[in-house]
Amino acid sequence: MPTRPPPNLPDGEPLSPRERLHDLGRTLALVWRASPRHSVAYALTTLASSALPAANLYIGKLLLDEVARAAQGSVTYAALLTLLAVQVSLVVLGSLLSTVGNAAQQLLGDSLQHAVTRRILDKASDLSVEAFENAETYDRLQQAYREVGTRPLGVATQLVGLAGALVTLASVGALMAQLGVWVLPLVILAALPGVIVSNRFGVENYRMLRWQTHDARVQNYLGSLLTSDTLVKEVRLFGFETYLLTRWRDYYLGFRRQLVDIIRRRSAWGFGAALLSALLIGLASALILRRAAAGQISVGDFSVFILGITQVQGTVSGLLNGVSGIYQNLLYMRNLFDFLELPTRDLDAGETWTGPIETIEFQDVGFRYPLTTRDVLRGVTFRVVRGQALALVGENGAGKTTLVKLLTMLFEPSSGVILLNGQDARRFSPRSVQRQMSIIFQDFGQYQMSARENVGLAEVERLTDVAGVQGAVQQAGAAFVDTLPDGLDTPLGRLFQGGRQLSGGQWQRLALARLYFRGASVLVFDEPTAALDAKAEFETIQALREHAGERITLLISHRFSTVRLADQIVVLDGGVITESGTHAELMALGERYAALYTLQASGYADDRGETTPAARVAVPEA
C-alpha cells in the first residue's frame, strides 16, 4: 500500500542560487560535450529566428499602410510587390532557419541521450556491490534514467530560448512602444499570472513525482509479476492474480488522488490567471482604440498592436516559463547529479595481483552494511590453502554469502583483515585479485544471449575460444548444448525472438561451465547443485572432486552430500563461527553440525531404518 507523504510537502532543502548555477553549468557542459557542432547550429538558428517576428510585423505594417494609400491612388503596384517580396523572403528565411534548427536540435538530443545514458551506465559499473543492495540507490538510478531523454536538452533549449525571447521582446516591444507609453507594460503584465501559476504547479509536479518514485517502482514490480513468463505458473496455480491486481490498483488510486488534487487546484488558479490577463488586455485595447478614434494611429499601426499582443504575450510567457522551466529542469537534473555523485569504488586501484592464490586467511573479520548498526559477520577467522576445499554451513541469513562477497572482494571488511598468500588483500586492486577467482552464485545469471556467450562471459577476451567453451561445457556436464538448434550459438531465454528456454538445472549447468571456463586458482560454489536432480547432483559432486585439483575450493551448500567432500567445514550462526573441523570431527563433536546432518540424513531412512537408494546418491562417501 502507498505510504509516501503527500506531494505538497517540502522535499528537502531548496537549492541555493549557487547550487542552481553550478548544476546549470554542469548541464550545459553535458550538452556541449555531446555535440559542439549541433549546439552552435541550434543556438545560432534560434537567435536569428528570434529577430524575424519584429521584421514581419514591421513589413506587414508598411504593406497595410501602402495598401491604404493605394486606395487613394498615391502608391504604385510595383511598390506593393516589392514589400510583398520582402515579406515572402522573410517567410522563406524563417522556414529555412526552422528546418536547420529542428534538425540540429534532434541530432543534439540523440547525441545527448546517448552521452548521458553512457554516463549513467558507467556510474552503475563503478558502484560498489553494497550500493546495489540499497533501495535508495535503485530510487536514484530510476530517477536518473527517467530524466535522460528530455531534461538536459530541455535546459539547453530553454536557455537559448531565453536569449531568443529577449531579442524578440526587445524588437517587437520597440514597435509597440510607439503606440503609447502604457500599451507594452499592460500587455507584458497580462502574461505574468499564467506564468506564475504554471511555475508554482510545475514545482509541485516535481515534488509529486519525487515522492512517488518508490511507490511507482513497487507498482511496476507488481505489474511485472502479472506479466512474467517465469512466474505465471505460480500466479495461476495459487490464484493470487486478484491480490496483485488489488495492490497494483491501490497504488494507482493513491497516485490518482494526488493527481486530482493538483489538477483541481491548478485549474482554479489557471482560470483566475486567465481572467486577470483578459482584463489587462482589454484595458490596453481601450487605450489603442481611443488613439484610433482620435486619428493618431494608422491601419498599419493598429495591425502591429493586434498581432503584437499575441507575439508579446507569447514571448513574455516563453521568457518567464523558460526561467521557471530551467529551474524545474534543474530540479530533475539534480536527480541525475545525485546519482552521478554517489561514492564509487575503483576496482583497479592498488597494486596488480599476479600469480595463483596459494592461501586465504581471514583474521577477526567483521562486516556491517553502510548506515546500519547490525554486524552481519563478527570475528570470523579461518585459513584455507591450495588443494583444500572449505565448506560453509549455516541457516539462511547466517552470513555465508556475505563471507563469499568479502572473499571475492565484492565487499570490503568493516573490521579485521583478509590475507592472500600472507599479504593484506587491501594492497591489491580488486579487479586483479578477482581474475584469480571464479564463482557460481546461488542466484546465478541467466543471460538472454547465446549459449557460447553464457559460458564465455567469464573471460570476455576469450569469447571466440570455441574449444575452451566446449571444454568447460563438458566439465559441467552440459551435454544438452549439443542438442540445441544452433549448438553453442543458439540464443537462450524467451526475452528475444528465436530464444530457446532452458530448465533450471540446464541453466545451472551453464553457470558451472562459466565457472570452469575461467582458469582461476580459487573456485567458489554457492549452492552449486540446488537446481539439479539426484543423478545430476552426484555427477556434479564427482566433477568437483576431479577438477578442484590444486586449487582452493569454497563451498556453500545446504546439502551435506556436497559439504562432506570438504577438507574443512565452518559452521556459521548469526554471523559468528561456532564450529570448525572435518566432517568426522564435527560429527564426533555432536553439536550444531551433527544435529543438522542427522536431521537431513534421517529424511532418507526407510521404515526399517535403512538408507534408501536416493540417500546413497545424495550422501556419498567423503
Image: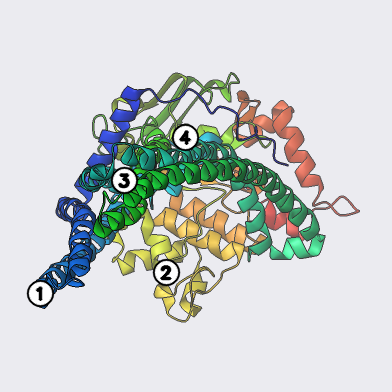
Q: Earlier in the sequence, mark 3 or mark 4?
A: 4
Q: Which mark is residue 131?
A: 4
Asked if labels 1 and 3 touch by Cβ distance under 8 angstroms, the answer is no
Figure quadrant of residue 328: top left
Tag 3, which secondary structure?
Answer: helix
Q: Earlier in the sequence, mark 2 or mark 4?
A: 4
* Residue 410 in the image, given as x and y percentages of width and height: 43, 36
Task: Specify whether 246 is left or right of 201.
Answer: right
Q: Is residue 370 above or below residue 112?
A: above
- Which badge, 1 or 4, is on the more N-terminal residue? 1
Q: Nearer the viewer, residue 301 or 43?
A: 301
Colour basis = rainbow
Instruction: Report x, y in % for residue 176.
Output: 26, 46
* Amino acid type, label 3: Gln
Within 10 angstroms of label 2, few (less than 14), some, or many (20 or more) residues?
Answer: some
Instruction: Name the mark on residue 158.
Output: 3
The residue indicated by pointer 1 is: 76
The earlier-in-sequence mark between 1 and 2 is: 1
For the residues labelled 3 and 4, the Cα–Cα distance comes to: 35 Å
Q: Position of residue 308 (x, y in %)?
A: 31, 52
Q: Earlier in the sequence, mark 3 or mark 2?
A: 3
CB of mark 1 within 8 Å of CB of mark 4?
A: no
Q: Is residue 346 above or below residue 370?
A: below
Q: Residue at label 2?
A: 450
- Asked whether residue 612 is in view, the answer is no
Mark 4 surroundings: few (<14), some (14-19) or many (≥20) residues within 10 A? some
Residue type beneath disc 1: Thr
Task: Tell me: residue 257, above or below residue 11.
Answer: below
Q: Secondary structure at mark 1?
A: loop
